[in-house]
Amino acid sequence: MMSDQQIIEGCAKHNRKAQQLLYDKYSRFLLGICLRYASDKAEAEDILQDSFLKIFFNIQEFSGTGSFIGWLRKVAVNTAITHYHKNLKYRYHIEIEEYVSVETGVSSFEEDFFTSDELYKVLNDLPAGYRMVFNLYAIEGYKHKEIAEMLGIDTNTSKSQYSRAKAALREKLDKLRRIKGSYSAGNI
Amino acid sequence: MLEEKEEDKVFDELFRNKLENNEVIPSESLNQVLMQKLGRKEFLHFIPSRFNIWYLGGIVAAGTTLALILSSDPGEEMNLQPEPPFDTVNKSEISLNSGQDISQIPSIPQTIDNQAVISKRNSTLKSGNSNIRGDKEQTTASGEIISAPQNITGTVSGKDVLSGQIEGKDKLQETANRTSNIIGASVTSGCAPLRVSFKGADTFRSYRWSFGDGGFSDEKEPAWLFDVEGEYDVQLQVSGDDGTWSVSSVRITVYPKPVARFEISPEDAAIPDDEIVFLNYSGNSVRYKWNFGDGNSSDQFEPRHSYRKFDNYSIRLVALSEFGCADTLEVKNAFAGSGYYINFPNAFIPNSNGPSGGYYSQKSDEAADVFHPVYSGVSDYQLRIFTRLGILVFESNDINMGWDGYFKGQLCNQGVYVWKVRGSYINGEPFTKIGDVTLLKN
């Protein structure tokens, strides 16, 4: 078993075996990230491929000081952002008004109530812009100002997209819970 | 509002906890597709470590093409390949035993020689009394070439002597005056490396020079560089249109090059306090000219000198040999680069229980309750601290005593104070610094 360090060194020399090991070790983790930024798994896998190409060709830029996994995550997120920009013009934009008046009826969710697949699904179904901001803010932990720079939007846009994304997600989860709740109730 | 924030957090955390590091298994085919893409991309990027048969093939093809292009134009080819030794003036710089090794250019062994000397000197730093540090600029100037008069001692066999046999020296010497116009040299003696331009008389069909150090030339007017000391008998064999030929020779004397080397002692000299001793390690030299950089100079072998004040002096030694050849070593900023420093923090928190007197320790540093510098190599020191209105609240000439934040027994107000320090380091280099410090209360 090769250590991360050995894999990194191997990849820096474009050693095919090391590249394969890197893929085997981290592809699932990175796809987990990419899927949050995509509208379906096929798109997520496109982003994953591009991420790996970037990783393999730029691995010598990884300084070795920070966390390797953090660096991989950063590459994947940046690739997702690039992908988002590239495909922006082909996307179907959902009118903002659609979500403006959503009620914030549900105030808490039990963590284990939803599976991760269900959470991916509601994220995938979000409009791309909302999804980007929500991922970057809520999960990756960037500040609105940083997100605004990354996506080339206004800070206030980032803030409002975030709150709209949340409203939309909440509504979807609420709906999902009702379905699940009735399902489990029916079970009893 | 607060409630909503709280609720926001719960919502974000739901996604973060579930999805931040969630793993998703990629499709089976993805791996293969990726590796194919990678292969294509890597092929387009040249990566030395993945040097393979394809690149090799490409290089062989390119090399063959190049060779074909070159062989079709021999004139071009001449510029790309190591040239045979006897063609042009440039090539006559190929000296030493250039008959054996045509790629050896005299400046190269010399450079290596110099570096060897420098690195040797650097290694002596550890032994203690050297003041020449690696980070100082060192320059060596090559010796001047002393021109000699056109005093040609030619030895020539008469035109009528067809055998070409070199005859008795007395007789040749006798004929030299008569036929000295066959061979001309710009100089016949000088300091190594000595460059000599030779000139053969006009009336001959072919010229064959032998420089006495293994080098040859067929030019009419070659230039040659003698970079090793010694005496060289340079011969010129000329042949005329009528088939007659004759040999003429001239002696070139190359004097050894002196080497200027010195060290400064003591290594960590304090200026102006210390008297500096210049230790002379020069070679092949009999006379010395020192320039201490402050306007003073000396002709002594190992002079001593005291500087009046600290400055960035450049010290130069010119070493002269008995033949008048010279070498120069200059050490710039000979006394700089000490690595001494003095720095101040920008905030401190005085002890509110009463004045401490300003003497600081490890313990007071942990509480940051005394304002004082961190420093190295400070000899003279004066610290003064003013309020923003310019009132002097603290003054110390003792670097071991900092400011405890009190003025006339009263703890000063929280705020910004201005400090000014002046003094000098132990090598004599002065310093003056101004800054501000924020007094905080806890």
Image: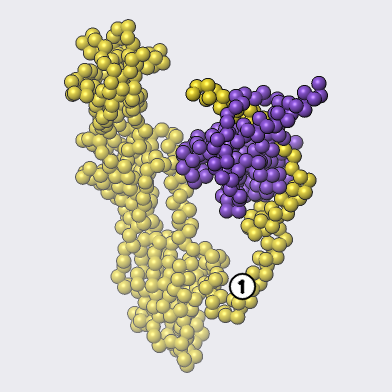
Chain colours: A purple, B yellow
In the image, B216 versus B8, the foreground residue is B8
Residue to which mark 1 is pinned: B66
Viewer-side residue, B373 vs B332? B373
Q: Is residue B423 left or right of residue B201?
A: left
Quadrant in the picture for the N terminus of chain A: top right
- Asked if residue A147 lies left or right of residue B144, the reply is right
Q: Give the image quarter of residue A169.
A: top right
Q: Residue at x 35, y 34 (%)?
A: B338
Residue A110 x %, y %: 67, 23
Number of marks in the rendered image:
1
Against A114, is B257 above or below?
below
Dividing the picture into quadrants, the one containing residue A64 is top right
Residue B146 appears left or right of B75? left
- Other residues around mark 1 within 10 Å, as few (<14) / some (14–19) / many (≥20): few
Disc 1 residue type (three-letter): Leu
In the drawing, does residue B145 fall left or right of residue B412? Answer: right
- Could you say where residue A56 lies in the image, as x and y percent from the top left? 65, 47
**In the displayed image of the protein, which residue is found farthest to the top?**
B353
Label 1, secondary structure: give it. Answer: helix
Do we see residue A68 in this rendering?
no
Q: Is residue B38 visible?
A: yes
Please give the name of the residue rendered at 64% of the width and 55% of the height, measured from the top-left corner: B47
Residue B76 versus residue B352: which sits nearer the camera?
A: B352
Q: Chain of mark 1?
A: B
Residue B111 position, x and y percent, is 45, 55
The answer to whether B40 is drawn above or below residue B187 in the figure is above
Name the one closer to the observer, B359 or A21: A21
The quarter of the picture where residue B295 lies is top left
Q: Determine the residue positioned at 73% across, 54% down.
A: B36
| Residue at the image position 81 percent from the left and 21 percent from the top | A188
Q: Position of residue B103 (x, y in %)?
A: 54, 65
Q: Farthest bottom residue?
A: B242
